[in-house]
Amino acid sequence: MKKATALVAVVCLLAIAVVAARFFLSEDDFSMTNLSWNGLYALSSEVGARPLYNISSLSDKGGGDTLLIIGPTKNYTYDESLQVSSFLRRGGTVVVMDDFGASNSMLHAISSPISINSIPLCQHENYYVNTTFPIIADISQTPFTRNVSSLVLNHPAVLNVTGDAQVVASTSRDAWLDFNHDSMLDDGERMGAYLVAASCDYGNGKLIVFSDADVFINSMLDKGDNHALLKQLLTGSVWIDVSHGHGMTPLGDIYFKLRYDLAAQLVALAIIIALTLAAAFKGQIGKMIKHLINYNNISKKGLYGEKHGYRNK
């Protein structure tokens, strides 16, 4: 009997674990709860990043905090762009990592001198795996690129830079724009050096743009000096925008709220204490409930007797 009970308990625990994993883990690109090659779980865990569910939440942030915009799939509205602009002016850092160009809606709205040109980029000779994984060795000295001598990118695009912006990283002169997406240098595709990272001052803050969303995914974080860049790039509280295409799993949402929200922590603590007390004193609680039920029944009988003239004399 004991063995059967233990087996049932083990099976139930395994089932709970599987269900919990299903509602916590994600397979989506750039998801904070994705442990696979294309997720941001390693980044999120290492720097204590928090999900930003709504751009309007930036109104109470800034002054040293960092907003990461990684691989957005939805355009930013004008009002959302103004929120990003205000965050920057207050001293926040915004790091945009995008190769498809959805972030351009925001970059153009805030008059950024940097934007994304979503044409794929390849590089001959100096690459990892193949020409679509260029190794970037031409890196300018900035406060966040100290000890960064090479970055490994994964199917990057290129940047358009105009006005007052600082070039942070460029390809070698053996790179080209792959207009027909065949990873080959064809007629009409010219070799040259192309920009893949740039930055500019914006109010009291800093805007940094990379033409590759994959630099910090789980499978790329240990390539080249990508990890060293991560450690130096992010300051203050780190927020990842999950409102433009990536979302959050149900249990992932609960996990991050419990990890960082004091009110949610206090509610969870109160529930745990209540359940613990209920389990510890279930016998006494049961007796109390039974006593209350009996007392209520006696009271009703007494009231019934009084109404019908049955009071004892």
Image: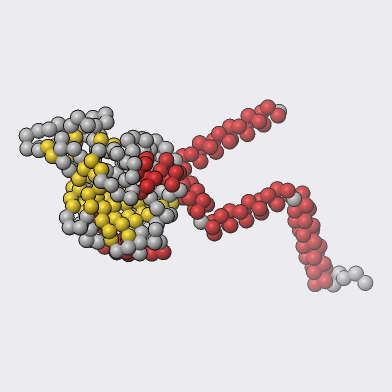
Foreground: 99 or 176?
Answer: 176
From the viewer's perspective, tell me whether residue 251 is left or right of residue 116. right
- Residue 302 percent location from the top left of the image: 82, 67
The residue sitting at the left extreme is: 187
The residue sitting at the right extreme is: 313
Q: How is the image coloured?
A: secondary structure
Foreground: 29 or 70?
Answer: 70
- Residue 274 percent location from the top left of the image: 66, 54
Q: Residue at x 17, y 55 (%)?
A: 162
Quadrant in the rendering for residue 28: top left
The answer to whether 234 is drawn above or below residue 81 in the figure is above
The answer to whether 228 is drawn above or below residue 297 in the figure is above
* Marker count (numbered): 0
Quadrant in the rendering for residue 263: bottom right
From the viewer's perspective, tell me whether residue 297 is left or right of residue 252. right
- Residue 247 percent location from the top left of the image: 38, 49
Q: Is residue 297 visible?
A: no
- Residue 117 percent location from the top left of the image: 18, 47
> Which quadrant would the N terminus be assigned to in this image?
top right
Q: Residue at x 30, y 49 (%)?
A: 142
The answer to whether 133 is drawn above or below residue 159 in the figure is above
Q: Is residue 92 visible?
A: yes
Q: Residue at x 68, y 27 (%)?
A: 3
Q: Residue at x 70, y 52 (%)?
A: 277
> Which quadrant would the C terminus be assigned to in this image?
bottom right
Foreground: 264 or 1?
Answer: 264
